[in-house]
Image (tube, helix red, strand yellow):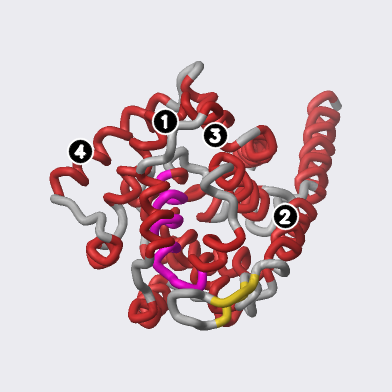
Amino acid sequence: MATSATNATSATNASNASRASERTDHGLLGPRSVAWTVLGHPMSLVGGLRALMIQALHPLAMAGVAQHSDYERRSLDRLRRTAYYVTATTFGDTATAHAAAERVKRVHSRIHGVDPVTGRPYSATDPDTQIWVHCTEWHSMLAAYRVFGDRPLTEQQQDLYFAEGAIIGSLLDTPRERIPASHAEYRAYFEAVRPRLCLSEHSRKAIDFVLRPPVERDTLHLQGPMRLFASAAAALIPRHLRRLAGIDRPRWQDALAIAAVRPLCAALTLPGVRALPRAVFGGEVHAIAIQARRLSRAG
């Protein structure tokens, strides 16, 4: 009888745990997604900085930043806004993800004008521009993980990661079927968009801003790490884009830049140093990341 009662209790507890798991909102992707592994890595910051530099080479995307962004005066705020959106849509629950997307859509609705480089009209709500921003960001995160990640991803896992990215990319109302969703589709997309890229005065300034952020009072304590991360990010940019941007350099310098941040990656688990991401990204991002880690362990 005791054994039967114990088994019954265990079965009840397992059933309750299963129902609780079903009630837990894991967001749009969930702990078992490849994206949680890739974007949850500490060196995703390197991927984010890589994306910012590549994005600046698209004249229409850069025009919106140059004419509507205050990144030069409030660089940390802009970085935190971007980090919050990526974190909320990837790791947040469903309501948090959609709320973050709605917030960005409201901002994007006010961003439009004429690009001084091409003379073409631009809009942050334009699907082509949104696809460029999404693809450079999503691909850059994977590029950083390939170099700094804990274990290599198979081709199938990478394709799944890109397919997961299409779900996130469609949150801003870009048709999901237009967003590249595999490694092959990304390769074809980047080849197709390559002739449209150029280096302008504004893009040169934005890239230099990432590589050599100005010394400000609220970011003084972050100067050293951020410059190291940015140098490592530059090392991960394809060489033809680095030549276009005027930031190409010998391979040995790339190797040194990557080697320099590896100790920081390992140190992010240590007391004091592990507070660095919170200092950079802010409390909202930190809270979502903590909850995501708990869900990952529970899963």
> Cα distance, mark 4 to mark 3?
24 Å
Identify the image quadrant of the C terminus.
top right
Which disc is residue 223 wearing?
1
Residue 184 visible in the current orientation: no
Q: Find numbered disc 4 in the image and state the secondary structure of the residue it sits on.
A: helix
Residue that label 4 marks: 256
Residue 70 lies, with reference to residue 115, above or below; the image says above
> Cα distance, mark 1 to mark 3?
11 Å
> Cα distance, mark 2 to mark 3?
19 Å
Residue that label 3 marks: 280
Q: Find numbered disc 2 in the image and state the secondary structure of the residue it sits on.
A: helix
Q: Quadrant of residue 122?
A: bottom right
Q: Amino acid at mark 3?
A: Val
Q: Amino acid at mark 2?
A: Ala
Which is more N-terminal, label 3 or label 2? Answer: 2
**Tags 2 and 4 in contact by the CB under 8 Å rule?**
no
**Tags 1 and 4 in contact by the CB under 8 Å rule?**
no
